Structures are given as C-alpha cells and as structure tokens.
C-alpha cells in the first residue's frame, strides 16, 4: 500500500503546499515589518523634518497648498495601510485554502482527480501581486510628494 502511486502523489502535494504556506508566512512577516515601519514612522519623519529642520520656527511659513499636500500624503499613507491589509487578507485566504486541501488529502476526503482540476496558484496569488504593486506604487508617490512638500516648505 505504501508504494501506491496515488499516496505518493498525495505526499508530494502535501509537501509542496506545506512549503508554499511556509514561504508565504515568512514573506508576510517581512512584509508586515516593512509596511508598519513605513506607515507608523513615515508621517513623523516628514513632520519632523518640516518642523525641526527649519530653525528658528518663526521663519516657518506653512501655506494652504502645503497643508493640502500634507493632507493628501496622509490619505495616501492610510490607503497604503488599507491595501497592505487587503494583501495580508489575501495571503491568509490562500494559506487557509491550502490548509483545507492538505486536511482533505490527509483524511481522504478528496480524490486525485479533484486535485487535478483545482488551480492552486492563480486567483489569490495574482491579487497578492497586484496589491504588492499597488503598495510599492503608493510608496513611490508618497516619497515623491514628501520630497516636494519638504522643498516647498524650505525653499
């Protein structure tokens, strides 16, 4: 019974999906660290460079366009956090889907023919990639607008 090709296929699928879950979990942990530092530290760096970079503060003149630009930056930071949260949710859904398949394989509640018809990678992985792209694009826009805001205030 151990040499049964179907059991070998099941073991291979379980090993592969376990590896995918492990790599996505590790990726999610590093993603959290990067995003949290950007979202929680970024606005304070911009504010600190504006308020403490210009001495004395009496020379600091903040006009309406600068307030609007800073407000847009704040909204972009919130949007980046929201998009990162969607990404985290998509990773959780994909890992849970794979865990469910592993459970069904281990308890013989799914047949190999059903496994062949499933798409293990496409839908959520594509959405995860798009969300990564969106977060990185927002980071680039935020960096550009932050530099522009600092230049507006100082020069």
Image (tube, rainbow, N blue to C red):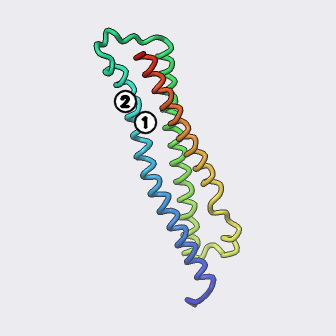
| Quadrant of the drawing holding the C terminus | top left
Q: Is mark 1 on a helix, strand or loop?
A: helix
Name above or below for residue 42 compared with residue 47: below
Q: Which residue is drawn at 52% across and 73% down?
A: 15
User: Viewed as shown, does residue 116 lie left or right of 58?
Assistant: right
The answer to whether residue 37 is left or right of residue 119 is: left
Q: Quadrant of the N terminus?
A: bottom right
Left or right: 118, with 102 as reference point: right
Q: Which of marks 1 and 2 is nearer the N terminus?
A: 1
Tell which tag, 1 or 2, sits nearer the viewer. 2
User: From what the image shows, is residue 64 above or below residue 151?
Assistant: above
Q: How crowded is mark 2: few (under 14 residues within 10 Å), some or many (20 or more)?
A: few
Q: Dot 1, crowdedness within 10 Å: few (<14), some or many (≥20)?
A: some
- The spot of residue 32 in percent (x, y) is 43, 47
Could you tell me which residue is drawn at 54 percent across and 67 percent down? 17
Residue 31, x across and y down, in percent: 45, 48
Towards the viewer: 145 or 26:
145
Name the residue that disc number 1 marks. Answer: 39
Give the quarter of the image for residue 138. top right
Residue wearing tag 2: 45
Please tell me whether mark 2 sits on a helix, a strand or a loop: helix
Residue in the image at 63% along x and 73% along y: 110
């Amino acid at each position: 019974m151990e040499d049964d090709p179907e059991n070998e296929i099941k073991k291979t699928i379980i090993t592969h999906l376990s590896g995918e879950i492990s790599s996505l979990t590790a990726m999610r942990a590093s993603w959290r660290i990067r995003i949290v530092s950007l979202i929680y530290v970024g606005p304070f760096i911009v504010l600190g460079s504006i308020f403490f970079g210009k001495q004395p503060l009496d020379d600091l003149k903040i006009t309406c366009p600068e307030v609007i630009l800073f407000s847009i930056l704040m909204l972009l930071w919130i949007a980046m956090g929201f998009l990162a949260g969607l990404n985290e949710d998509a990773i959780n859904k994909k890992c849970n889907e794979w865990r469910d398949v592993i459970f069904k394989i281990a308890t013989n509640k799914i047949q190999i023919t059903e496994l062949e018809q499933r798409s293990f990678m496409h839908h959520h992985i594509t959405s995860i990639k798009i969300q990564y792209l969106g977060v990185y694009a927002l980071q680039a826009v935020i960096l550009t607008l932050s530099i522009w805001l600092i230049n507006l205030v100082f020069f």
